[in-house]
Image: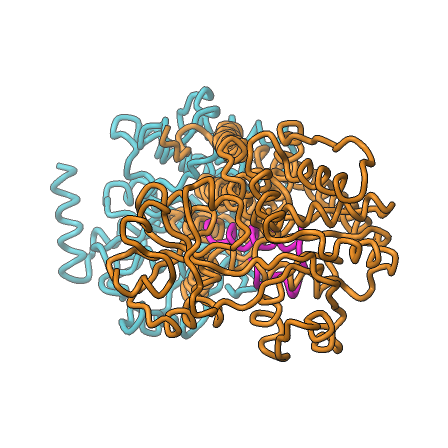
Chain colours: A orange, B cyan
Amino acid sequence: MRGLNKIRAYCFFLVIALASVFSVHSVAWADSSKVVVGSKAFAEGYLLGEIVAQKLERDGFDVERKLGLGKTIITYEALLAGEIDVYVEYTGTLYQAILKGQYQPQIDDEVADINQALKETPLKVLPSLGFNNTYALVMNKQLMEEKTIKSISDLKQYPDLVLSLSHEFINRTDGWQGLKSEYDLPFSVSGIEHSLAYQAIQSGKIDLTDAYSTDGDINRFGLQLLEDDLFYFPSYRALPFIRKTMPVDAQTSLAELAGLIDEAKMQELNALALEDDHSYAEVATDFLNASFGTLSEAETSYPWKRLMGYVYEHLWLTFTALISATFVGVLVAILAYRSSKLSRVLIYSTGLMQTIPSLALLALLIPIFGIGWVPAVIALFIYSLLPIVRSTINALVTIDSTLVEVAQGLGLTKRQQLRTIYLPMALPGMLTGIKTAAIISIGTATLASFIGAGGLGDPIITGLSLNDHEMVLMGAIPAAILAILMELLFEYFETRWIPAHMRSNVT
Amino acid sequence: MSLAVSGPCIQMKGVSFGYGQHPLFNRLNVTFPDQQVTAVCGPSGCGKSTLLKLVNGLLLPSEGEVSVLGNLVTHNSLDALRLKIGYAVQRIGLFPHLKVAENIAIVANATDMEQTEQHERIQFLLDMFNLPSVLLKRYPHELSGGQAQRVGLCRALMMKPRLLLLDEAFSAVDPISRFDIYREFIRLQQEEQFSVMLITHDMREARFLADHIMVMESGSILQQGKIESVIAHPSCDLVKRLVKEHLLCEA
């Protein structure tokens, strides 16, 4: 019973701690003088995000970066919800994925057309940065020479080639479906995460994938673009996509970037960013210095220095989600376990939520909760519920029926029975469930980076987009260590709270 | 032994009960005399344990009413009533996460009985059941079957109950110390004047401990009365057989 009191004391402390974190966060949200810059989670996205952010900083604006926000749906929803003020979007994506064909793209005055279509929304675009980063198919240069493939039309003669395309490309109407019928291609395709596709080609696992035409990696991996001989792919000009509420001075500042980057320049910048010694920030600074004159030394914040920050963010995400899931999960399990029907409904429904792929869940949460810390915690909370609910219900219903009868026969009230008998007896099972949830959370929390919640996912996702293994490991290894430490922490709790003969210890 | 009966400690009127589709009791009337030990005997499955669970409200009758210590057994009266009822079962029923001392004092702790009073009562009961006090710091799984059963009896007696329900509660106590414990138990029963419902399959135990006996078969009562008179005048075949086997053993 002393153990239980101690648990209560810990819980109390944690609730207080959480409450203070929440209040700090809400204060941070209220600060509206900042310009919040977002970006998609691929190399060019990061780089353009940095360029936009630093351009604003050069002109005296206070900038907050939320770079690497996953894919179009996340950045777009974030902009719409006002979680970010600007990110760089492409005209083709705007036309296909966002405005869904509400305007007819014309090369002459695209910006005016798009803004006309955006009239009813709180959003608008600024003049294009210059380059056209359209979709392309890429293939190993040697293989192309061997088979004398030059253009996409040539592919028809080689139905044995293995195509693996990014999920976004497969599903957009101006992507694979249209391409396939336009060129009458004989392939069936599988999906692959874009940042892994080049390595897959290099190691011979696949032959073709989709790419952006300004991708600095194309040369490095010995790949070559296939000629779009039927001019299928539409124009993808990069332009700042902003909220109309953005200060006019800031809009003017970003408009100065118009036309500064052509395709060659973008490929060069992308390639520079892929080199090991350059961070996105450094490449952006050098570019801006070259275009607008040197201002100051680039702030080199090599991520090792930020490691402790990542770990801290990661733990806050995990613990907040875990503790709330424990409270809710245990409470719900206690209320439901006496009814086997209700228990089953609970376990099925929490199980169902667990089957939602984590990226999809994050995307679904954005319209309701925006981006950042809150939706990330909610996603982790949802994933933590199943193991906690299941193990608690299981631990409670498997208590020996004689002991339940004796407990009832003693004259203790229902609350006393629960507190002094059922919960302590179920504690080993409950702890196992909470431990499982904790370890799942530590792993899943790396995805929180996609919606700007920080944590160890930041170096992992940045590293993936740069093909920088060192940076990926910088996130992955601490995450693994945290998982092990979590295991040890729970072992410690078990030895403190549970008598030796009741521990479900495998070790 | 006092023959004066101040009203029954248990009274069932027209009680029906069954598990699922199978009726076990059909309009049963039962009376247990106050401050006396009544043994309930009969073959397995005759309804002894079910009868006991109707007394402390673990089961509620589908028809009829049960009064215990002058109170009707209902959902609302249960918690208060059970505090006056001690309960010990054959299968051990000690809570594995609590040490022996915590097991015995579980209700005392929940109802804020004073610590010194608790210690005195625990020590008194340990002595009575011949249990060394080093056991207090052990967990149930470290006890022998007989020790655990005696700890269960200590817990049932801890709150000085007015009625004690024992479901084969002496079955694992070892034969050598058994009779000492019976004697101590009777002395305590007479001193504290509680009533006992003693479920047992052991006629010898019944004869040693009980004043009255009730013999059951498949949910009905075959014979009830003072134990010596039932032995002298068994009313039917089953009771006769029970008595005969017992007498053979005695011889």
Q: Position of residue A193 (x, y in %)?
A: 44, 52
Residue B203 position by quadrant: top left
Q: Quadrant of the C terminus of chain A?
A: top left
Question: Which residue is rendered at x = 20% and y = 56% of the image?
Answer: B233
Q: Is residue A425 visible?
A: no
Q: Residue at x 51, y 28 (%)?
A: A492
Q: Is residue B70 above or below residue A56?
A: below
The question of residue A369 being in magenta is answered with yes
Most common SS among magenta residues: helix
Residue occupying image coordinates x 69% and y 31%? A301
Asked if residue B154 can be seen in this view, the reply is: yes
Q: Residue A103, how many percent across, how many down?
A: 64, 79
Q: Is residue A125 above or below residue B195?
A: below
Residue A438, percent from left and from top: 51, 41
Q: Which quadrant holds residue B12?
A: bottom left
Tell me if residue B15 comes above or below residue A389 in the rendering.
below
Verify whether residue A389 appears in magenta: no
Q: Looking at the rendering, which quadrant does residue B1 occupy? A: top left
Q: In front here: B188 or B158?
A: B158
Q: How many marks?
A: 0
Which portion, as a residue range, is magenta? A362-387
**A153 or A348: nearer the eye?**
A153
Q: Which one is nearer the viewer's eye here, A219 or B125?
A: A219
- A452 relative to B139 in the view: left or right: right
Query: Residue at 66% of width from left, 27% of height from top?
Result: A305
Which quadrant, please, contains the N terminus of chain A? top right
Q: Nearer the viewer, residue B164 or B143?
A: B143
Image side of residue B174 versus residue A200, left or right: left
